[in-house]
Image: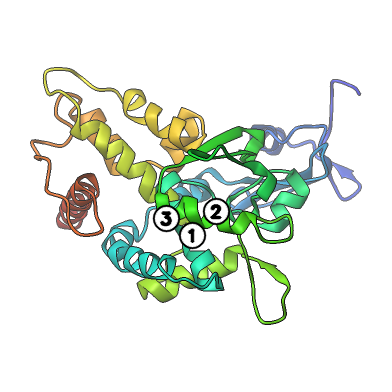
Amino acid sequence: MGRYWAYFDGDERVTDRDTIERLNSIALPPAYANAWFCKDPDGHLQATGIDARGRKQYRYHRLFREQRECSKFNGIIEFGQALPKIRREVDRDLRKRELNKEKVVAGVIRLLDDDYLRVGNREYTRKNKSFGATTLLSRQVQDNGGKVKMRFRGKSGIEQEVTITDRTLRRLVRQLQELPGQALFQYVNGDGNPHPITSGDVNNYIRDASGGEFTAKHFRTWGASVLAFEQLMNHAETKRISVETMVEPVAEALGNTVAISRKAYVHPALIDAVKQRPRDPLNGIERPRARKWLSDCEVGLLQFLTKCSKRKKTAA
């Protein structure tokens, strides 16, 4: 393959220097097949192409990416407030004796809540050979009679290992392993056939239990921000703390890089607090008391984000 490439508009070669500079700045790899570029420099979607593995890749406008990243955190306060309702419903369903759909879905949500897994979907697993909670296989579980571990390939090919510490969830996983079929999280209804749980089942359960428009993705964002807040809560005021120090444990728990965890999962208000007040990022906030269904750090994060939201509205 040559070292040079050119852009074409139909059969006409693009020669305008400003246009070429803009297209180059998108940084779509020349090796991508079926490359397409948006003519509008302000369009949300700037380019697409097919990579070597046959996957369609997208390049978005910088402002659109920033807006989308911010939208990930919209509703996170409301999600934290709704968590007790979701956890109460999950706890109730996990106590059921019958191994029905509701109990198995509740098990998936407990796993998302405790261990920050992605929910997963079958199409992504089929294409990329990577797994999330709903696509885990029974053979990916190791049970030595005491600890129950899950070893699987996560997004971006990162190998993940999760140790289940919740006794109720361990018991459920052992029951599920006795069912026929490859999928771990599945149930058998009246027809006698196993039915794997889907991401849609999980999201429907979350919406019904919470009464809000929340999805499985909120658990991972919430969990990451709680972990980051915990680092700040445990931070000694006599020492400065950096953003990287705060985010490193989050990245390890999520199985992500520090850069991705910082950009996509830790709430921006926590990042800003560390940058503005590295010696006292929480501005004197004391560790609150835990509540029913919420840990002390979850209560503290809710208080912190609520204050930040009020200050933002006042400033506006």
Residue 267 at least partly seen: no
Q: Nearer the viewer, residue 301 or 170?
A: 170
Mark 1 lies on a secondary structure that is helix
- In depth, the one of 63 and 20 nearer the eye is 63
- The residue that label 2 is drawn on is 173
Mark 2 or mark 1: whose residue is earlier in sequence? 1
Q: Secondary structure at mark 3?
A: helix
The x, y position of residue 135, in whole percent, is 65, 54
- State the separation of the CA atoms marked 2 and 3: 9 Å
Q: Residue at coordinates 19% horizontally, 58% vertically from top-left? A: 313
Q: Looking at the picture, how far across and down is residue 81, in whole percent?
A: 26, 63
Q: Read off the residue under disc 3.
A: 168
Give above or below for 10 relative to 92: above
Residue placed under numbered mark 1 in the picture: 107
Label drawn at residue 176: none
User: What residue type is disc 3 on?
Assistant: Thr
State if disc 1 and disc 3 touch (CB < 8 Å).
no
- Give amino acid for label 1: Gly
Q: Are marks 2 and 1 in contact (CB under 8 Å)?
A: yes
Q: Quadrant of the N terminus?
A: top right
Q: Quadrant of the C terminus?
A: bottom left
The CA distance from mark 2 to mark 1 is: 8 Å
Between disc 2 and disc 3, whose residue precedes?
3
